[in-house]
Amino acid sequence: MEFSGRLVAFPPSELLQWAHNERRTGALVFRRSRRQKRVYFRNGSVVACLSDDPADYYGQHLLLNGYLNEAQLVDALSYCTRSGKRLGLALTELGLLTEDQVQETLSQQISDSVCGLFLWNHGVFYFEEEFPPEEEILPSPIETMALVLEGSRWIDDFARFRKVFPHDNVVLCRGPVWPGVNLLPVQQRIHDVVDGEKTLAKIHWRIKGSYFRVLQGAYNLCMTEVLDLGAVGEALETTSLEINVYDLLLEQAVEEQSVGRDDSHSLPLGVLGHMRPIWIQDPSADDLSSLPEDLREIAGSFDGATRLSSLIPRGSQPFRSWDYLVEQLRKGTLALLPASPQELESRGLEKTSWWNRLFSSSSR
């Protein structure tokens, strides 16, 4: 990590300005509670943003803003599956959008995804000198300082929205001037799912897309009295606001790096990938049966012979597997070996009482 830290110390506005002023080429990676976004720069300008949050997907952006209906998006995605082509190209080949519309909407979607980072109150970041596949790059870069100004406006607007919606556990119902006229596409989608029972959180879950844009649309509908507030429940934490073990470890690691402590030494994940986990104390059948299927399969492979790099999935969300591994290490029920027990024994390593217990408990 060339540059890393916590968002409480380095907010996204400062990080984007840093990339702009330094004319950086590479990726600023932001992580928070099982979510990751990668903002790519070329000479300080934003050229792409990849997110693993379904609300940020290009198709959801098109739905939310009225460029496509659900049937058209399903057709386009099916075409992508059959042809192996990307959504933007599929839309033009199917005649649903022009090439100019695809580029314009991609730029809008990337801008919204980047500006959404300004609403993150916690998380970590780091900079990598990497670049995305060519097909992910916008032909016309987005001016970084324009995004900084827009993101700052989102912060101000979000505070204004929160004066009406103190949290997302607020029920929306029909207002005095329902159903309203000349609604924007975002407002129409909100309008169509309001039933006097759904909370703001459930409405966003139902229509997806940019959280800020949904909140903005609901706010404007309330201000024009198309919608009104119903019941206001207790503020509830959602999974998007929780910090898991992996996040806490990552925050601690980058914080230690950022302050440059001499006694802080980071062990590269590439080295850990060669380590082999082995049970010191085998989990009970009840413990294993209570685990989700993916974790149960991984736990059954902690045999001292299989490398971590082969066990932990490389998908967009390996966090639960890492959480489980760290939990067992901290409990002292799991150990990491530099080689398999058989390799260690073949090298003539003298068996101490600890090794004797480990080998006997892990023999299969």
Image (tube, helix red, strand yellow):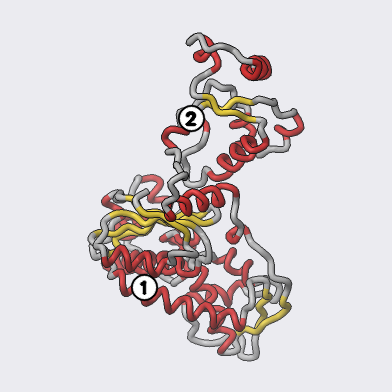
Query: What amino acid type should be assigned to the residue bearing mark 1?
Result: Val
Residue 138 to residue 228: above or below: above
Judged from this view, the residue extending furthest toward the front is: 262
Say if 334 sits above or below 326 in the image.
Answer: above
Left or right of residue 336, residue 357 in this image:
right
On the question of residue 53 being in view, the answer is: no
Image label count: 2
Residue at left offset 49%, top offset 69%: 119
x and y percent of residue 181 in the render?
52, 87
Query: Label 1: how many residues lie within 10 Å, few (<14), some (14-19) or many (20+)?
Result: many
What element does badge 2 sit on?
Answer: helix
Residue at x-position 64% and y-position 73%: 167
Q: Nearer the viewer, mark 2 or mark 1?
A: 1
Picture disc at residue 267 = none
Position of residue 75 measured from the top left corner of the image (x, y, whole percent): 43, 56
How far is the residue under mark 2 from the one under mark 1?
Answer: 40 Å
The x, y position of residue 325, in whole percent, is 59, 37
The secondary element bearing badge 1 is classed as helix
Q: Residue at x 71, y 29 (%)?
A: 283
Task: Report the front residue among 283 and 178.
Answer: 283
Q: Nearer the viewer, residue 159 or 196?
A: 159
Q: Which residue is mark 2?
A: 310
**Amino acid type, label 2:** Ser
Q: Residue at x 60, y 89 (%)?
A: 225
Residue most extreme to the right:
286
* Nearer-N-terminus badge (2/1): 1
Q: Quadrant of the C terminus?
A: top right
The residue under label 1 is: 148
Left-right relation of 20 to 329: left
